[in-house]
DNA sequence: CCTTTAAGAGACCTTGCGTCTCTTACGGCC
DNA sequence: GGCCGTAAGAGACGCAAGGTCTCTTAAAGG
C-alpha cells in the first residue's frame, strides 16, 4: 500500500530542493558539496537540479536567497551616525555567520559575479544613513569621496574574506570609531 | 641512440616541476589546472608531484614562491609618506598582476591559510614607513590604531579580491589621498 | 661495486560531472 | 472525466581526475 506515488512539482519541489541544498551545505560544507549529494538528499535525480541551475554555485546562491530572503536593505535609524553604521555592519556580519567563510570563498572562486550581487547592497544604505547624519548637522557634509562612503562596508568585507574567524563586535566598533567616524567628522 | 636515459633529480627536477606548474597555470588557468596536466607537462608521473605537495594549492603556492621569490619586503624610501605608501601599494598590485584574481580566489578557497602568508607582510613595511614619516615631522604621531596602520593594505586586498578587473593606479591614489592620509594627518 | 633511493611510467579504483534514456505521475485543457 | 504534454524520479553511461600502488631501472652515495 505504500505506493508513495507522490511526485512533487513546481514551487513545492523547488522549495524542497533548496532546503536539501542548504541542509547538505551545512552537513558537508561547500568544498565537499556535490550535485549528487543534494539530489540524493532531496530524493530526486540530478537532472531535476541541472534543469534549474547549471552548477553548484548557482544552486547554492539560490538556496541562500531562499533561506535569508533577498538582502533586506532595511535602513537603520538609531538617531546617531555611529549607531546607524554599526547597525549596518552588524547586519552584514550576521549574514556572514549564516553563510560561513568557506562557502563564501568557494562561491567567489566559482561564480563570476558574487561580489556585486552580494556586497553591492550596503552602499545605498550607507548613503542614506550619511545623508541623514548631515541633515541632523552631525557631520559637516554628506558629500564624501566614493571610497570613504563605502569604507565601512569594504573593511567588513575584507575582514570576512581574510580572517578565518567570525567577525566580532569589537572589530565592527574599531572600523567605525577608529576609521570611519574620524574621516567623516571633518572633511578635507 | 635516443636512449634519453636522463633522469632528473633533486633541485633540478624540482625546478622543472615548478616551471611546469607555472606554465600550466598560465596555459589553462587555476580552475582547470590538474595534477595530471602538470605531470604531463613536466614529463613525469603524478607520484613525483604528490611526493612533494599533497594538492593543487600547495603546488601552486610553491610555484609562485619559486617564481617571484619570497615577497621582498623592500621598504621604499621616497622622502614622503605619500610616496612611500603608494610605492608599497604598487608593489602589491604588481604581485596581483602576476598572479591573477582567479588563481587568488582558487587558492583562498582551497588553502586554509593563504591570507597570513601572502598578505601579512605589508604590515611591517607600513609600520616602518609611518615611523619614518613621524620622525620627519610629516605626521603628528606614528602611534596609530592597528586598523589605521593596515588600512591601505586592507583596502588594496579588498580591491584585489572583489573587483574582477586589475587594480589601477587611480585606485591606489584614492586609497592614499582620500582615506589614509586624511586619517594620519591629524590624530584623534 | 654494491646498495639505497626515488624517477618515470602506467595500471587501477573511485568519485563526481554532465548527459541521456525510460517510464509514468501530475496538471491543464477540452 | 478523459486525453496529452511536461517533467519528475530513477538509473545507466562515458569521461575526467583524484589519489594509490606497482614495477623497472637510473642515479647518487659510500
Image (cartoon, coloured by chain):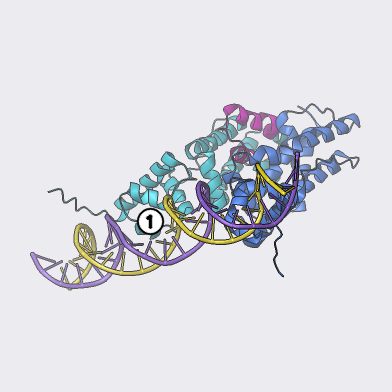
Chain colours: A cyan, B blue, C yellow, D purple
Q: Is residue C5 left or right of residue A104?
A: right
Instruction: Give residue B122's position: percent from left, percent from top.
Output: 76, 38
The residue depicted at 39 percent of the width and 52 percent of the height is: A36
From the viewer's side, name the closer residue of A113 and B55.
Answer: B55
Tell me if residue B31 can be seen.
Answer: no
Give yes or no for residue A24 being in the magenta stretch: no
Q: Chain of mark 1?
A: A
Mark 1 = which residue?
A49
Q: Quadrant of residue B125?
A: top right
- Vertical side of A26 occupied by B48: above or below: below
From the viewer's side, name the closer residue of A106 and B176.
Answer: A106
Total residue callouts: 1
Instruction: Give residue A143's position: percent from left, percent from top.
Output: 69, 44
Residue at disc 1, secondary structure: helix
The residue depicted at 47 percent of the width and 49 percent of the height is: A61
Instruction: Give residue B165's position: percent from left, percent from top.
Output: 67, 56
From the viewer's side, name the closer residue of B124 and C29.
Answer: B124
Quadrant into which the N terminus of chain B falls? bottom right
Q: What crowding class fits label 1: few (fewer than 14 Cα within 10 Å), some (14-19), or many (20 or more)?
A: many
- Chief secondary structure of the magenta portion: helix
Bounds of the magenta span? A155-182
Amino acid at each position: 500500500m505504500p505506493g508513495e506515488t507522490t511526485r512533487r512539482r513546481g514551487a513545492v519541489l523547488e522549495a524542497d530542493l533548496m532546503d536539501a541544498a542548504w541542509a547538505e551545505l551545512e552537513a558537508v560544507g561547500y568544498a565537499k558539496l556535490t550535485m549528487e549529494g543534494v539530489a540524493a538528499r532531496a530524493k530526486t535525480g540530478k537532472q531535476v537540479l541541472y534543469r534549474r541551475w547549471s552548477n553548484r554555485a548557482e544552486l547554492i546562491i539560490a538556496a541562500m536567497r531562499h533561506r535569508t530572503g533577498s538582502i533586506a536593505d532595511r535602513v537603520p535609524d538609531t538617531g546617531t551616525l555611529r549607531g546607524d553604521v554599526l547597525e549596518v555592519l552588524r547586519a552584514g556580519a550576521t549574514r556572514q555567520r549564516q553563510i560561513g567563510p568557506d562557502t563564501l570563498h568557494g562561491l567567489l572562486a566559482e561564480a563570476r559575479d558574487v561580489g556585486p550581487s552580494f556586497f553591492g547592497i550596503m552602499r545605498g544604505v550607507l548613503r542614506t544613513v550619511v545623508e541623514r547624519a548631515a541633515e541632523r548637522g552631525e557631520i559637516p557634509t554628506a558629500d564624501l569621496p566614493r571610497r570613504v562612503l563605502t569604507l565601512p562596508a569594504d573593511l567588513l568585507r575584507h575582514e570576512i574574506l581574510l580572517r578565518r574567524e567570525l567577525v566580532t563586535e569589537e572589530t565592527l566598533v574599531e572600523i567605525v570609531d577608529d576609521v570611519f567616524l574620524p574621516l567623516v567628522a571633518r572633511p578635507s
